[in-house]
Amino acid sequence: MIEVQPSGAALGADIIGADLSKPLSSEDFGAIHRAWMTHLVLRFRGQNLTDEHLMAFSRNFGALDGNPRHAQVEGRSPAAASGFVNIISNVVENGKSIGGLGNYEAKWHSDMSYNPIPPMASALYALEIPPEGGDTSFANMYTAYETLPDDIQTRVRALNCVHDSSLNSVGQLRVGFEDVTDPRKTPGALHPIVRTHPATGRLCLFLGRRRNAYIPGLDLADSEALLDTLWHHATQPEHCWTQQWTLGDLVLWDNRAALHRRDEFDGTARRVMHRTQISGDRPF
Ligand code: OGA
Ligand code: MN
């Protein structure tokens, strides 16, 4: 039987006693799923996984999303070529990046929230890690919503926000996009600022990404001010927990109710992570 060890912070728990290279019993999967719904981010330490194991574990939760476009570049490794494992890495081989995001800071975001149907979850598995830096932090968007003043809760329940599709999470312009100079023209999906989690029924903030965000119906200055208030509140340390990677860690996050960010790290060090993404549904 597996054991759940909460981080003690606003989110995050270790799952002890699970070997993810083997199929999970329905009891263990049930316990893992319940822990995930409670703690939003699960960490499984000391794993030894192939891409097939990573995919099989991820498929317990739902169908996998294909790679984002940037991973399907010619010359990528067999993992990327499988179509369901994306590489997050700063490593350059033969003049080509083997993965995405480089060694840069990734600001707070929810994965691919600029799509109308953003992923439910992502799973990130550590194959090579730098001696320091590259930590990944998570923020609990249930507690962020629940601790907002009542008047702001009421106000934001009636509003939507545009999630910018022009920049990736390290701020690079995606292929085929132009720089946004006016957030009122930002390309990307429109989502409710407060969403109902489809599995728990709880309300949470769904902020996506701050850059170029805009709340239609508000003056630009009012939109900026409200977004700044929400983002400042949502990323307070009391809502957060930070993962410091060790080799063999697999971290699974609920992309609907948690934000994440990554610290930068020394570009001469190597960091190689393999990642799956599980399909979600339309926020409501
Ligand atoms: C991601 C991501 C963070 C990290 O893969 O979506 O944000 O720690 N990665 O590499
Ligand atoms: Mn991400």
Image (cartoon, rainbow, N blue to C red):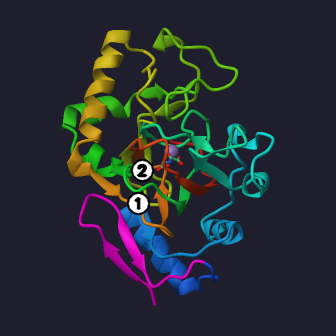
Q: Left or right of 95: which side holds 43?
A: left
- x 60%, y 51%: residue: 280
Secondary element at image label 1:
loop
Q: Give the residues in magenta.
A: 1-20
Q: Position of residue 175 (x, y in %)?
A: 68, 25
- x 58%, y 23%: residue: 173
Amino acid type at mark 2: Ala
Residue indicated by mark 2: 257
**Disc on res. 40:** 1
The CA span between labels 2 and 1 is 7 Å
Q: Position of residue 246 (x, y in %)?
A: 43, 66
The outermost residue toward the bottom is 1
- x 53%, y 75%: residue: 47
Number of numbered callouts drawn: 2
Q: Left or right of 142: which side holds 260?
A: right
Nearer-the-camera pick, 241 or 101: 101
The image shows residue 141, relative to residue 32, as above or below, that is: above
Amino acid type at mark 1: Leu
Would you call the spot at circle 2 few (<14 residues within 10 Å), some (14-19), or many (20 or more)?
Answer: many
Nearer-the-camera pick, 267 or 60: 267
Can residue 219 be seen from the camera position used here? no
Q: Left or right of 162: which side holds 83?
A: right
Residue 217, picture quadrant: top left
Examine the residues drawn in magenta and state their main secondary structure: loop
Can residue 190 be seen from the camera position used here? yes
Q: Position of residue 229 (x, y in %)?
A: 25, 28
Q: Are marks 2 and 1 in contact (CB under 8 Å)?
A: yes
Residue 231 colored magenta? no
Q: Left or right of 35: which side holds 240?
A: left
The image shows residue 275, relative to residue 52, as above or below, that is: above
Secondary element at image label 2:
loop
Q: Position of residue 162 (x, y in %)?
A: 50, 25
